[in-house]
Image (cartoon, rainbow, N blue to C red):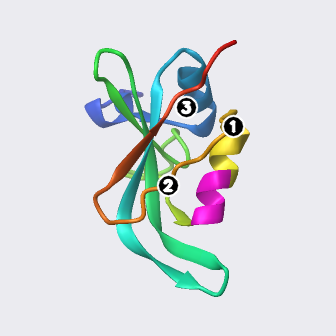
Amino acid sequence: MNQTTDLELNVTTEQGLRALAEEGHTVEVLCKADPERKGPSWYGLWIMRTVGNGGQEKILVTARTRLTQNAIKVREFKTATGVISFLVGVGFSQASIPMKNGETTSHRLVSD
């Protein structure tokens, strides 16, 4: 039996996030732990979600397919470089990263 739960409706994979961003959804970066500087790099905990025009949110997960019960895992970024690389890979030309726990920054693809 293959049922979709409410949780699965509110998640997306990297491929899905790209498609939603191209459709005009906002991509938000959420800071979940204050970053710390170690040498030239910043280490913290960030997650991402998309927000549609109607307010529908979808959290980025590592994989949509469940291997076991409750196996959906939120994709976590542990370095600022990882966040930047992901956003550039999606197609953004700029990356804004929140640097305090609880803060959020928003990104939107601009079409020419």
On screen, residue 58 above or below 25: below
Q: Dot 1: within a 10 Å radius of its alpha carbon, few (fewer than 14), some, or many (20 or more) residues?
A: few
Quarter of the figure with residue 90: top right
Quarter of the figure with residue 77: bottom right
Amino acid type of the residue that numbered disc 3 sits on in the rendered structure: Leu
**Residue 26: horizontal and vertical position, in percent?**
45, 28
**Residue 43: horizontal and vertical position, in percent?**
53, 75
**In contact (CB < 8 Å): disc 3 and disc 1:** no
- The prevailing secondary structure element of the residues shown in magenta is helix
**In contact (CB < 8 Å): disc 2 and disc 3:** no
Q: Which residues are magenta?
A: 80-84
The residue carrying mark 3 is 17
The residue carrying mark 1 is 93
Real-space Cα distance between discs 2 and 3?
A: 18 Å
Residue under the point 64% across and 60% down: 82
Q: Nearer the viewer, residue 6 or 38?
A: 38
The residue carrying mark 2 is 97
Left or right relative to 99: residue 21: right
Q: Nearer the viewer, mark 2 or mark 3?
A: 2
- In what element is the residue under mark 2? loop
Q: Dot 3: within a 10 Å radius of its alpha carbon, few (fewer than 14), some, or many (20 or more) residues?
A: many
Q: Which quadrant holds the N terminus?
A: top left
Whether 81 is among the magenta residues is yes
Q: Dot 2: within a 10 Å radius of its alpha carbon, few (fewer than 14), some, or many (20 or more) residues?
A: some
Real-space Cα distance between discs 3 and 1?
A: 16 Å
Q: Answer with mark 2 or mark 3, whichever residue precedes in sequence.
A: 3
Q: Answer with mark 3 or mark 1, whichever residue precedes in sequence.
A: 3
Real-space Cα distance between discs 2 and 1?
A: 13 Å
**In contact (CB < 8 Å): disc 2 and disc 1:** no
